[in-house]
Amino acid sequence: MTYLVILERGANSYGAYVPDLPGCAVVADTREEALTLIREAIPLHLESLREEGAQIPEPVSTTELVQV
């Protein structure tokens, strides 16, 4: 499965989260570190859902850049 990851730059850090996996989020010092951490977090999050007997959400989010 391929999940959309949103990256956000803060004043002193970067955040990354997966809209289709509520609660799957990370914070890091750099964009690259945030991407590394979210790549590690997604399988762990899915494993946790499976252990709880929860349904694995299908990826449905998409993006579109809009120039204004």
Image (cartoon, grey):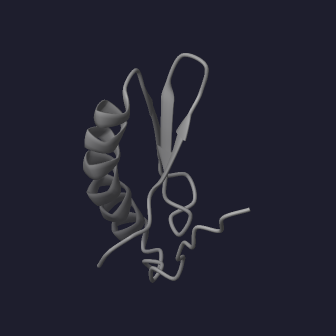
User: Which residue is at the far top?
Assistant: 12
User: Depth check: 36 or 46 in front?
Assistant: 36
Nearest the viewer among 25 and 64 is: 64
Residue, x 51% and y 37% (percent of image)? 15
The x and y percentages for residue 28 are 41, 26
The residue positioned 47% from the left and 74% from the top of the image is: 54
- 1 displayed left or right of 54: left
Q: Report x, y in % for residue 25.
A: 49, 45
User: Is 39 located above or below residue 57 in the figure?
Assistant: above
Q: Residue furthest front?
A: 68
Residue at screen point 25% across, 41% down: 36
Query: Up-down: is 50 above or below 35?
Result: below
Quarter of the picture containing the N terminus is bottom left
Q: What residue sits 44% from the left and 67% below the top?
A: 4
Q: Residue 10: image x %, image y %?
A: 59, 27
Instruction: Please tell me in which quadrant of the rendered image residue 52 appears.
Output: bottom left
Between 65 and 38, the one nearer to me in the picture: 65
Left or right: where 36 falls relative to 30: left
Task: Pinpoint residue 8: horizontal percent, then vertical percent.
Answer: 55, 41
Q: Is residue 34 above or below residue 60?
A: above
Q: Quadrant of the C terminus?
A: bottom right
Q: Could you tell me how many numbered marks the image carries? A: 0
Q: Quadrant of residue 59?
A: bottom left
Give left or right: position of 14 versus 43.
Answer: right
